[in-house]
Amino acid sequence: MAGTPGELGAAGGRRGDGVGGSAPGGSGAPGVGAPGTDGTSSGSGGRDGAVADPQPAAPVVEGEPGGHPQRTQQPLLFASGLDVVYEPAGAPVVHAVRGVDLSIDPGEMVGLVGESGCGKSTLGYALTRLLRPPARITAGRVVFDGRDVTALDQGRLRTMRHRGFAVVLQSGMNALNPVRTIDGHFADVLRTHRRVRGAAARQVAEELLGHVELAPTVLDRFPHELSGGMRQRVVIALALALQPKLVVFDEPTTALDVLVQRAVMDTIARLQAEVGFSALVISHDLGLVLGTADRAWVMYAGRIVERRESAALAGAPLHPYSAALLACHGDPTADNVQLGGIPGSPPDLSVPPQGCSFAPRCWMKEPVCRNDPPERVIGTGTVACHLAPRKLVVPRALEATVLASTAGGMGVGQNSTDGTATYDGRAALSAGPGPGASDGPALSPGAAAAPDGAAWAVRRRRSLERVEPEALVLQDVVKQFRTARRTGGRAGGRADGAWPGVGRARSSTVRAVDGVSLSLEPGHAVGLVGASGSGKTTLGRMMAGMDRPSSGTIRLGGLRVETMRSRDLPRYWQRVQMVFQDPYAGLNPVHTVGYAIGRALRNHQRLRDDRLRSELHRLLEVVGLTPSGQFSAKLPHQLSGGQRQRVVIARALAAKPQVLVADEPVSMLDVSLRAGILRLLDELRRDTGVSLLYITHDLLSARLVTDHLLVLQKGRVVESGPTASVLRSPSHSYTKQLIEAIPVVA
Amino acid sequence: MRYALRRLPVLVVTLWAAITLNFVLPRMMPGTPADAALGKIAGQGPVTASQRRAIEVMLGVPHGSLLSQYWQYLKAIAEGNFGISYTYFPEPVSKVIGAALPWTLALVGTSTVLAFTTGALLGVLAAWRRGSRLDSVATVGCTFMTAFPYFWTALLLLYALGFVLGWFPIRGGYSSSVSPGWDWTFAASALRHSVLPAFTILISGLGGWLLGMRNNMMGVLGEDYVTFAEANGLPARTVALRYAARNAVLPSATAFGMALGMVVGGSLLTEVVFGYPGIGYLLYNAVVNEDYPLMQALFLVITVSVLLANFVVDLLYGFLDPRVRR
Ligand SMILES: Nc1ncnc2c1ncn2[C@@H]1O[C@H](COP(=O)(O)OP(=O)(O)O)[C@@H](O)[C@H]1O
Ligand code: SF4
Ligand SMILES: [Mg+2]
């Protein structure tokens, strides 16, 4: 079982050592809300005391409070021994949350991180009693504000939601009723809980919208008329209408654009400090959590394996899993950039764990790990690992996924205007560590050369046949679209905010790509970055021959996309292949991996029988899906996201392309899987001379796999140059914004 | 309103296409339907010159150019002059149809609407109380009901309630002892006669609506906006109706539009089994007797009603779903 009372107490008791910023110093529940409320100067007067209204005397907790001997105050919420299972009909029981103890103090912000499928959402839903069948709480209790919420009936629970807890669901994309105006949403909530109707309700709604920086006109809109960021703000405002003491944010920014992500997180942090509610921020993005939360919990396979103050976790993680997650983040502007990954994937939660559930992926495991690790108190945090607090040295096995890019190597690129020199720099890099490449706690750069033990090591010595080198050259490429009379989140390059034009745009033409020229030399990698709607995908599709430019030329040797007839397109596609963002949508669910790649081999290379089979296996090995015999028989649903993306890449390689256009190939994958795919792309380029157009909004990955970078804004290239120099000394304000939007770890 | 105006051209074009098709088809048939019809009608009694002319205009005896024929045809339709019926000689076709239409609209229209509303409401309830007794009974019962052939239901009802128990009359739209008119005895008789056919339509339709609505609801209940509404502590009724059902009904609305379109033409089997004096029964007689003038007019009425119903539902959909409005 996890944490004994004593350990939990330690986790909570860490409040003593300065939690920086927003936390009002643990002075007891009543004090928390009131000052914050007054602080909300901007027209919050009407909001009758905003969120946390002064409570009566300290709440009476039923039973003993799960052991918090060192506490100076009662936690707002605590759970002990919480177990949640899913019992789907005709499928094995999934044990999604196991024996979790936790507590959240009034006014603090806690982050909950872990890869997808680790049970974060389930835990968040359990805490707020939103679980639906087939999910069920089988053990433990959740005490909120002195009341055991696991025992409340639906009616009591409903009233409790007011001034109790609120939930902000994943990215808010879908959290609003599509057939109801925003005004209607507010009216429903305000009527139910605050008995405010009509004009008065509208006034309150307008004030709430003001808190999330939205104009009152938003009230008359339907959800589909708002951008993703605006919708998420509306959802936050609705949650605030409940005047909650605790808000659970489940992946609040996951589906949002980078710049919007930052803005929404800032709003959340500001509101939390001003209004004084407690917050639990669930995210798979450790960077995001460490940048905003006071404390962080790392969840793995249904358990909280480490809980620390954010700064402490960022500085020196104690659990190998936390360390590995942390290694998946980095600062793209640093001298020396590295990216780690975690081999394997989280365990199947329908199988009871044998000992430590991280053991199959853990490089430090020892015989003792066959036993369930206890949660131990270390300093002000806890960690569930037998070996903690041993110093974490990242081993060779993990180093296989390290991508290193040093400032020394980049220096070459900076001197050159075309990418050639940079490419040489990168090649040199792969041979060995760059000079002075050894900062950060995690991963040694030397590993790039020696991925022994890793699946894709096998093929590094082999080499694909080289293709005739030809550059893909774009000249003044323009693409116009006629817009429908709708402004979604993506149209026109507008990211978020600015309401004047919302949903009322006239039918007009939009220049999605506006005069772009570039040359992609053989064996080079060009990165295309920008916020969503900036025209990246449109440009990529044209380069891949899937769309024709409205004007301008796209040439690859003798082939010209702008004048090509449809029957010539296959010849182009043989040379230029595209890898899409979503590895789940790209594969036909009823065809095996072998069939999917085999068909591409037949179409493009006209291979048959034995030659086809041997080429198929070679490709699977190239992308690291070994043993290839086993993988070729699998169906897409039997693969993880990372494996699927490898299949998609193998299929693209089946054409023996000269150019690979990769449109956000890792953005849908968990951070732990990204490094592997990025490394694969990087190696392909170096080993086979294929050139790469890498489209992304993630600057870190762009830094790692590209040598030249174009920054796109509203269809125009606003900045370009060698990747490292663009990122390290950006000259355009938009580039600076993009860089600033990256959550800073520690 | 702008939305409605934008839909209007589509309606006009499809209507025109249907009317034109109805002009072209008899003229493409082997032989001359007009002559055949006139020949048969002549056997019934004297045909006046204007009656003969009307049939020629509708069914096509080559007088003049195709264009002038087309023009004559359109004029005839505008006047409602479809010629005379052979089956109901010497009644004009328009009068025959005019007499049958109200029966069908009242019986089939009402029972279709009733089947939809009760089916959808029960579907919402079943999904909201998923796993409950109500849910399992409704689901199993409806699956059985929809699998049961339509005319079997009709015959079974006819036999059990009409023939054996004698609770309801087994044939016709009203008793032969009363004369049609706006009075209570007639209304009561018509009502009693409509019970069995109405039940047939209700029973065979309801199951499908219930299952469809339940399925939609189950999908919608998994949506974030329902969870969020629940998380905001809204009353269960509000969540179930305003958030879940309101969205779940959208896919059913289109199907309902199709069903409404089928009201006029789709009740043939029921009306024949129960000898009900509606459009379906009329169509049956027209086909059996090769009554071309009647057939042609009926086809026109049926296609036009389908188009009109679809138009109305399109408008309704725009009203229901703000995302298609624009
Ligand atoms: N409706 C469901 N039925 C069965 N298993 C589920 C269901 N929802 C989630 N799970 C399982 O529960 C586990 C935890 O899921 P979740 O809480 O969504 O994780 P996270 O939020 O960390 O991504 C996963 O193994 C997932 O497959
Ligand atoms: S307990 Fe063992 S296997 Fe688990 S994380 Fe610690 S060292 Fe690794
Ligand atoms: Mg989740």
Image: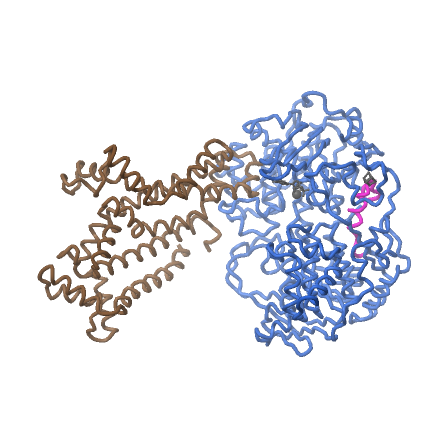
Chain colours: A blue, B brown
Magenta-tinted stretch? A313-333
Instruction: Give the x, y percent position of residue B110.
Output: 31, 43
Q: Residue at x 64, y 38 (%)?
A: A92
| Relative to A427, A497 lies left or right | left
Instruction: Give the x, y percent position of residue B215.
Output: 48, 43
Q: Quadrant of residue A130?
A: top right
Q: Residue at x 78, y 51 (%)?
A: A341
Quadrant where the N terminus of chain A is found in the figure:
top right
Q: How many marks?
A: 0
| Relative to A443, B165 lies left or right | left
Instruction: Give the x, y percent position of residue A734.
Output: 70, 59
Figure quarter occupied by ligand 3? top right
Q: Nearer the viewer, residue B104 or A262?
A: B104
Magenta run includes residue B69? no
**In the image, is residue B259 above or below residue A688?**
above
Instruction: Give the x, y percent position of residue B211.
Output: 44, 42
Q: Quadrant of residue A379?
A: top right
Q: Quadrant of residue A726?
A: bottom right
Q: Nearer the viewer, residue A582 or A317?
A: A582
**In the image, is residue A741 above or below residue A158?**
below
Magenta run includes residue A332? yes
| Relative to A133, A408 lies left or right | right
Q: Nearer the viewer, residue A614 or A71?
A: A614
